[in-house]
Amino acid sequence: MSLKRLEKIVHHLRSKHGCPWDRRQTHRSLKTPLVEETYEVLDSIDRADAVSLREELGDLLLQIVFHAEIEKSRGRFGLDDVIDAVSDKLVRRHPHVFGRGNKVSAAGALKQWEILKRAEKSGQSPLASVPRHSPALMRAVRIQDKAARLGFEWRRYAQAEAKLTEELGEFRDAVRERDRVAIKRELGDALFALAKVAKFLGLDPEEALQAANDRFTRRFHALDRAVRKTGREMRKVSPEELYALWRKTGKKRPT
């Protein structure tokens, strides 16, 4: 009943007796809040904060209910239709659990899911389901994973590493030639190749980059504190002195 209660509250907020702000919202205006709430859920997971996770999951659920209510007001579908559709999908794509299919391993279950998904979406490109609005690095991983499941994959790590070296060489050539269009293209190709290298090493490049962001942020805070102790602002300190202070906060210089 809790979900029905939430649905009724959102319906009332969007009614003529509800809130003017809620009535004005559209799918497009709610795109940013949907993304923000998703990242707040991820942040709670990373912090292993169960109290925060409960709250953020609720905020994310609100976004889903809100989008469904918008469509219900247009007479196209409602929250029950969304729930029924995903429930049917789960049953349909787990024949080894809900049907008479043979027992499979975790890897086999994933492969079976992809086969059933392709059958349902026949005629579509295998990569069509990867959202273009995903963070670019995350999208690269998803694209590469889907291509690999169809057999388009390097056989050995050395091949992936060689491709990265090749793309970095082309990037350097573009920089030397000062070709802005080529620089952008080759930088993208190098990042894409780096994501493939990460996959062969069993690493998530998105998590690796976030960890690097965190390390830099912590060290930069330390640098800022060190400068403030001298009674100055960072922009008024010479690059040479900043680098000297930076070295004192850790072993590596900023990149």
Image: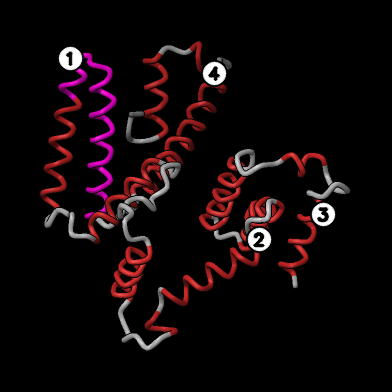
Secondary structure mostly taken by the magenta-highlighted segment of the chain: helix
Give the residues in magenta: 172-200
Amino acid type for the residue under numbered disc 4: Thr
Label 2 neighbourhood size at 10 Å, few (<14), some (14-19), many (20+)?
Answer: some
Residue at image mark 2: 78
Amino acid type for the residue under numbered disc 2: Gly
Label 4 neighbourhood size at 10 Å, few (<14), some (14-19), many (20+)?
Answer: few
CA distance for labels 2 and 3: 15 Å
Callout 3: helix, strand or loop?
Answer: helix
In the picture as drawn, the residue positioned furthest to the front comes out as 75
Can you tell which of label 2 and label 3 is closer to the viewer? 2
Residue at image mark 4: 230
Between 186 and 247, the one nearer to me in the picture:
186
Question: Which quarter of the image is occupied by the N terminus?
Answer: bottom right
Callout 1: helix, strand or loop?
Answer: helix
Residue at image mark 1: 177
CA distance for labels 1 and 2: 56 Å
Amino acid type for the residue under numbered disc 3: His
Ranked by sequence position, the earlier of labels 3 and 1 is: 3
Q: Is residue 167 left or right of residue 122?
A: left
The reply to whether callout 2 and callout 3 are in contact (CB within 8 Å) is no
**Residue at 42% across / 47% down in the picture?**
131
Instruction: Find residue 196 and report its horizontal and vertical position in percent.
Output: 24, 48
CA distance for labels 2 and 4: 61 Å
Residue at image mark 3: 12
Can you tell which of label 2 and label 4 is closer to the viewer? 2
